[in-house]
Amino acid sequence: ARAMAERTGSPLAEGAPRSPASSRQQAGFASLFRREHLWAVVLFAAVCLLVQVNVAVLQVWLPELMTRAGFSTQGSLSFLIALNGGAVVGALLVSRIADRIGAKLVVAGQLLLGAGALWLVTFPFPIAVLLVLVAFVGLGAGGVVNLLYGFMANYFHTHVRGAGLAWGTSWGRLGNIVGPLALGVLVGTVLALNAIFYTLAAIALIAMILTLLVPRTPPLELESVPVQPTVVAADPARP
């Protein structure tokens, strides 16, 4: 195509993103907060914050909450193992589904499943059933993090991908800090144990709704690069 364009003098449409050196397109945060990305940037920040709040709260407070529910210390720690096991195994399984139908629907489905499991944990099921439910909670909490970041990486174009991931993970880190502190305040109040699980389920549902509201990836603008024809001098030695 380039050789043909050189012969005819026609402009060559480049399929790669325009670089700052050759066009007005900016990279990094300067382009991340432009109008076409702004709504998605706000939504991703909120989803990362809410997801990591649940992850941090469950990692720090789940054994204590289950102890208050009447389980022994050893039994409470087994719930933490089930939580992390569900996150690891579940993430590996749902990643195959995400490759087929897209990460957006899978992330939303994980959050919905986690919210439902958090609600069901409040019922007096046998411990074996509760362990399975907590594993599903892990799928909708820690298991959703890596897939969420993969969703963000595929959503943003190359020139803003690093900035987009940095933006989302920064809000996630904020959730890691705020979540356990906020729940510590709630645990110190007269808030019922079931209400804490309902609160975490509501956070997961809000994150699911915000995930579904993420718009489609904006189209990448391409530019036509004019190519000047190359004049090749004739070889006098050739007939």
Image (cartoon, rainbow, N blue to C red):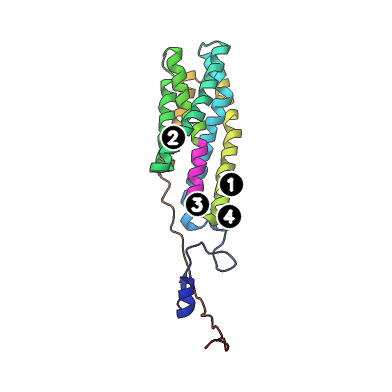
Q: Residues within 10 Å of mark 2 (few under 14, many from 20)?
A: some
Question: How far, Cα to Cα, is label 4 from label 1?
Answer: 10 Å
Evaluate if marks 3 and 2 touch, with contact meaning CB atoms under 8 Å apart: no
Residue pointed to by mark 3: 156
Asked whether residue 11 is in view, the answer is no
Tell me: residue 80, above or below residue 43: above
Question: How far, Cα to Cα, is label 3 from label 2?
Answer: 22 Å
Tell me: residue 216, above or below residue 201: below
Name the kind of residue labelled 4 in the image: Phe
User: Residue 78 versus residue 35: which sits nearer the camera?
Assistant: 78
Q: Which one is closest to the eye, mark 3 or mark 4?
A: 3
9 relative to 73 in the view: left or right = left
Residue at the left extreme of this rendering: 101
Q: Which residues are magenta?
A: 145-155
Quarter of image, res 25: bottom right
Quadrant location, the N terminus: bottom left
Asked whether residue 35 is in view, the answer is yes
Tell me: residue 107, above or below residue 186: below
Q: Residues within 10 Å of mark 4 (few under 14, many from 20)?
A: some
**Circle 4 sits in a helix, a strand or a loop, which is it?**
helix
Quarter of image, res 159: bottom right
Residue pointed to by mark 4: 29
